[in-house]
């Protein structure tokens, strides 16, 4: 690793043609992926990622360059390229433009709420194969419906350093563990394929000190078979109740993306210029919090070195804030909220969600179901797309008939306009469930996120 003195020189070169801010983002990432196909070892893949990205800003103009070479000479060449690109962007000779003079770097340490007990690198591949094999045996014992199973074990260890022209020098480490289960169930009448991830922020203790992953694997076989044998339903507009926990994906897709500064700055959101205004029912308090211990979207800092924080986006129906990175925050006149994120050093950071959730309310969960004569109860949601208009797959859904859960259904989507759905939330339960986490893809690649909620009733939604 190059010295802080060299980093400071590089930051100054990057600003030499008029940049008012520059930032270095160093990353080292190690990942192990072990694949079992029907209990047999199918491959061991190790990945090593190492490099640096250089960000230069002038007002709302930006340049981003990166390299996997981190010698002093390579960094100076990178900075010269960034400076040349900025000069082109500003369309003016550099001697006519004021430039920033970077402050001396001073190290700051921020607390990461996610604690690592067992380093993944301290466990042999044999030990990791044993864990994956246990999961396969658990799936086999869950019933006769299992036809095939492919298990991917992953552990990722990511180290980052952020150094910028404002004098910040800071580090963070992110360790994640997960298993991806792709399974097929069926009988002589047909088969059905389904996949899900078991995700945790932590080291190998996730598997060694808890059987949660085994319980997840066994239940997944039963749930997949239930999906296969479920019935279809007639489309329509009806009341919808979403179970606590993983159904928080609804908020991620229906309004989370349109509360990111990228959407606000491009004016592609129904929340533009509405801070302080009523945008949802009084039942809705929506929060994005990157500080929650052991949540998949939690870190000490974001990928621009800002400390993670709790951001109340909507409070009792009133729009309070947006999620901002540095650049798009400048565009809308707001400071960063600790939401600048990227998949790795090859991406420039943009505003992204972390752990987004609907705050608990005061309504009785059982009464919600009893109140619906004909409607849909959703236990889990799958993929889809978000924005002003959203559409989401219903993975596990049940008809509600006369205030009781009826038959399970399949092949269903819920669709709607995010602004309209927010106004139709009429009941919110008292207990927020836990959701293990997933990935969100956007302009800065895939990043780990969590979306969760209490039980919620929406007075009407389009089901198709």
Image: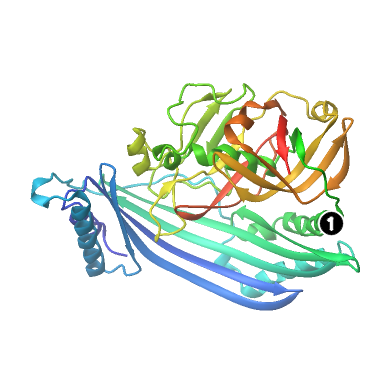
Residue 13 falls in image quadrant? bottom left
Q: Which residue is mark 1?
A: 222
* Residue name at image x 68 percent, y 56 percent: 198
Image quadrant in which the C terminus is located: top right
Q: Could you tell whether 17 is left or right of 53 in the image? A: left
- The residue sitting at 50% across, 71% down in the picture is 47
Residue 320 showing in the rendered view:
yes
Count of labels in the image: 1
How packed is label 1: few (under 14 Cα within 10 Å), some, or many (20 or more)?
Answer: some
- Give the left or right position of residue 261, taking residue 73 as reference: right
Q: Position of residue 352 (x, y in %)?
A: 48, 45
What residue sits 59% from the left and 55% below the top?
A: 202
Which of these two is toward me, 233 or 22?
Answer: 233
**Which residue is outermost to the left?**
95
**Which percent across, then down, holds residue 19?**
21, 48
Q: Is residue 153 left or right of residue 1?
A: right
Q: Position of residue 62 (x, y in %)?
A: 29, 49
In the foreground, 163 or 224? 224
> Is residue 354 shown above or below 118?
above
| Foreground of the two, 279 or 21 | 279
Point 57% across, 31% down: residue: 419
Asked whether, in this view, residue 356 is left or right of residue 366, the answer is left
Quadrant where the N terminus lies? bottom left
Name the spot of residue 286 as percent of width and height, x first: 57, 32
Q: How is the image coloured?
A: rainbow
Q: Is residue 294 visible?
A: no
Under circle 1, the secondary element is helix
């Amino acid at each position: 690793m190059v010295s802080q003195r060299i980093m400071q020189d590089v930051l100054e070169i990057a600003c030499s043609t008029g940049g008012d801010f520059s930032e270095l983002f160093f990353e080292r990432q190690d990942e192990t992926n072990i694949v079992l196909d029907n209990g047999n070892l199918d491959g061991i893949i190790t990945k090593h990622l190492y490099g640096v990205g250089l960000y230069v800003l002038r007002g709302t103009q930006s340049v981003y360059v990166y390299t996997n070479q981190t010698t002093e000479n390579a960094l100076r060449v990178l900075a010269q390229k960034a400076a040349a690109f900025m000069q082109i962007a500003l369309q003016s000779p550099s001697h006519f433009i004021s430039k920033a003079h970077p402050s001396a770097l001073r190290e700051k340490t921020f607390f990461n709420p996610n604690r690592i007990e067992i380093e993944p690198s301290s466990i042999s591949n044999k030990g990791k194969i044993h864990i994956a094999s246990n999961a396969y045996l658990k799936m086999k014992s869950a019933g006769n419906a299992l036809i095939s199973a492919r298990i991917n074990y992953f552990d990722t260890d990511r180290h980052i350093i952020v150094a910028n022209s404002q004098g910040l020098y800071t580090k963070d480490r992110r360790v994640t563990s997960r298993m991806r289960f792709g399974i097929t169930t069926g009988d002589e009448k047909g088969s059905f394929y389904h996949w899900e991830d078991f995700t945790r922020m932590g080291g190998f203790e996730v598997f060694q000190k808890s059987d949660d992953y085994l319980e997840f694997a066994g239940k997944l076989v039963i749930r997949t078979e239930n999906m296969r044998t479920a019935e279809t339903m007639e489309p329509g507009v009806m009341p919808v109740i979403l179970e606590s926990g993983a159904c928080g994906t609804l908020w991620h897709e229906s309004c989370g993306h349109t509360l990111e500064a990228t959407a606000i700055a491009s004016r592609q959101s129904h929340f533009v210029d509405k801070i302080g205004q009523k945008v949802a029912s009084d039942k809705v308090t929506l929060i994005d919090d990157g500080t929650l211990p052991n949540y998949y979207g939690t870190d000490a800092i974001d990928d621009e070195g800002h400390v993670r924080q709790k951001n109340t986006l909507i409070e009792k129906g009133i729009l309070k804030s947006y999620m901002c990175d540095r650049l798009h925050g400048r565009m809308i006149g707001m400071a960063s909220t600790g939401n600048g994120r990227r998949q790795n050093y090859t991406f420039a950071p943009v505003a992204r969600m972390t752990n987004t959730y609907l705050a608990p309310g005061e309504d009785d969960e059982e009464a919600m179901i009893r109140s619906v004569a004909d409607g849909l109860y959703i236990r889990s949601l799958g993929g889809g797309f978000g924005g002003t208009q959203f559409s989401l797959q219903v993975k596990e859904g049940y008809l509600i008939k006369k205030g009781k859960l009826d038959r399970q259904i399949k092949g269903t989507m819920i669709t709607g306009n995010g602004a309209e759905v927010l106004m139709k939330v009429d009941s919110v339960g008292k207990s927020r469930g836990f959701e293990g986490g997933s990935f969100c893809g956007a302009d800065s690649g895939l990043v780990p996120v969590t979306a969760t909620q209490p039980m919620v009733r929406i007075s009407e939604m389009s089901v198709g």
